[in-house]
Image: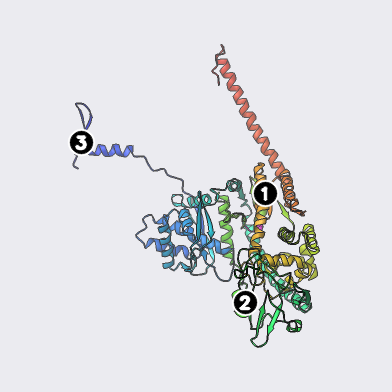
Amino acid sequence: MLDLKFGLDIGEKKHVYVSQEKCRQVYKRRKMPRKKHPTKQVTYMLPKGVREQIDAMIDGNGAYKDKELWKQKCYYICEYIATQNQMKSESQQEYVNIHQETMAKTVGVNNQGIARLLKQLVKASILEKDGIAIQAVVSQRGRQKVYIEEGKSYGYRFKAENPLETFEVQSHRQQYEKSNQSIKEIFSKYDRDLRSYNEVLKEIKIDTENLKEVIEEILKNKQKKKSQKENYESYLEEVEIKYRNNLLNSLKYYKGNNNQECKIYPFNGNIVPIKYEAETRTVSSYLTGEVDDENTADRSIDPNDEIYRTVSSYHVGEKDDQNNSDKTTAPVDQICRTVSSYQCKPRRFKIRSFMAKNRVKEKVLEPDETTIARCTKAVFTINEGYLFATRPVKDSRVYSAITNLNREFRSSIRLNGKKIVGIDIRNSQPLLACILIRHYWKEKQGELPEDVKRYQSRCEQGKFYDDFMGEIELPEDMRSMFKQDFFRKVFFSKVIEKGNVLKDMFIQKYPSCWEAITDVKGGLYCKDYGEFARMLQEVEAQIIYDVVNVGLLNQGIKAFNIFDSIYVTLKWESERAIGLINKIFQAFDLHPTLNVEYGEHFEENERKEIERHSQEFAKWEEQRKKDLAFKDMIRKSNPYGALTRS
């Protein structure tokens, strides 16, 4: 080996000749070694066969040098799509919108890199793209972006519909941990309360001692719910046949603004004068103009008839530019108006095509493999410390892996090593809707109608659902199915003429409440019918999370919420939570009925808390004795007392 000599000028008249091999050895010693992090096993959840497709795509592309790292980036993107879709449980997957800038920060690439990665996933027939994107209008206010007009990102879904599976891989360069930390910082960077809430979520764990039994119970209850749903639907069909004719034949008359008699369909979702035109086979709903009393008096409209309809609905306060007059001058006082910013314009359509587009999507039972994979992934996320909360929209609900967890896991949740106790509001959603309904009537006429007061009283007593279930003689074991169906058909549905038993009974009992709900939704066929559901969720989040949960955190109490329920561990903490709940509802002149869930855990948690305090006191006492012994030793070794001041 050629050994060259290098002269190094160290000082005046001093030259040291060092060989090249010696320089290499010195450089190698001085070079700092890369800090090695302990590798962690992380769990990903993907549809069957997707992992193999991703591995083949990355291995066959020479542009990716660190292949394991890029594989995990693809795993994360595909897992995000699978997670967003697995809670919907429709017969067909929906497209999941991916905001490329946010996803790029999450997986640690630039915008061009994430676009290239998604393009290759589509090219490899792993994903398919909807091809629809709308540019958002954004205003920069300081460090935050304010969306003036919302846009839409490209949507992606899996090409093949397969059940989910979980698999473990070693986190390459802590890729999984960095991705979760990035998304956590994106949502909680400017939200101090959310950061404090995430500190509490760090102390939540799932007891895995009986994990197998819990998953078996989930699978068993899933089949039980399927049979219950089938029984509920068949039972409701019988009720429909039994009560429908009596409900639809009970037509009422109402005198409007111009003292004209209008036919009102009390179970058709809106109060509109109807004009029938025999020649053109069309039905028009008017807010202005004369009403043909002869045709209106004896004519009933079949909502399923193949006819064309034109529906008009206007905002309160919208002015006509030509005559500067209100467009809201209606022939009836009780016409439903919208409080949202969207104006429902007149439009023409076929009833059958409308019903086809707005048909409720068929729910399918997820495979057992998907259920097991979802539960395994949730337990891994919580127990390995990757649990954090997100709040996608200001004033919206707070979401985390805990909120998506099956109810069967509640008894296995541990907060700071102790079992949890829940405080639940009876008839919470109808009671929260009472806040919106009261506000509507207070602003409209300054006082509450009698049926609104009756509605509030039944919600406060926790008897709202019992009244309807008793009227149709529904068994108690179908209560959960009834609640879901009630919300879907009454509170969260589009306002259309077609009625159903639950909506008809609600309108009979509480017509003023129905008027307020339909007014907030925007009236017949309004595209903003989801406004009521959005406002209801905002009221829930502001009361339960912003006031009660954050208030408990500010008092040093570790608590978390699952939508409308608050969970703590000790009895005095639950008393504080109940006090805050009652106080905020009293501000709205409401008095809720509260349930305490898992109250039997209080005694065990109190015993654990006493043991913890005893252990802490014992450690403090031991440390104090050590300090005293050290001081005595110093004093004996220095008889003259020349101790240095601490």
**Which quadrant would residue 564 be assigned to in this image?**
bottom right
Q: Earlier in the sequence, mark 1 or mark 3?
A: 3
Q: In the rendered structure, which segment of residues is drawn in magenta? A: 404-408
Amino acid on which the number 1 mark rests in the picture: Val
**Which quadrant would residue 558 be assigned to in this image?**
top right
Q: Nearer the viewer, residue 195 or 437?
A: 437
**Residue 225 at x, y percent in the picture:** 68, 67
Pointer 2 local density, CA inside 10 Å: few below 14, some 14–19, many at least 20: few
Residue at which label 3 appears: 6
Q: Which mark is residue 547?
A: 1
Q: Nearer the viewer, residue 201 or 490?
A: 490
Q: Which mark is residue 236?
A: none
Q: Name the dominant secondary structure of the magenta segment.
A: loop
Question: Can residue 97 be seen in the rendering of this structure?
Answer: yes
Amino acid on which the number 2 mark rests in the picture: Met
Question: Can residue 224 be seen in the rendering of this structure?
Answer: no
The residue that appears at 49% across and 70% down in the rendered structure is: 160
Q: Earlier in the sequence, mark 2 or mark 1?
A: 2
Question: Is 10 on the left-hand or right-hand side of 579?
Answer: left
Dot 3: what SS?
A: strand
Q: Which mark is residue 355?
A: 2
Question: Is 642 on the left-hand or right-hand side of 326?
Answer: left
- Which of the image's four quarters has the C terminus? top right
Q: Nearer the viewer, residue 178 or 398?
A: 398
- Which of the image's four quarters has the N terminus? top left
How many angstroms separate mark 2 from mark 3 (CA)? 88 Å
**Residue 244 at x, y percent in the picture:** 76, 77
How many angstroms separate mark 2 from mark 1 (CA)? 41 Å
Amino acid on which the number 3 mark rests in the picture: Phe
Dot 1: what SS?
A: helix
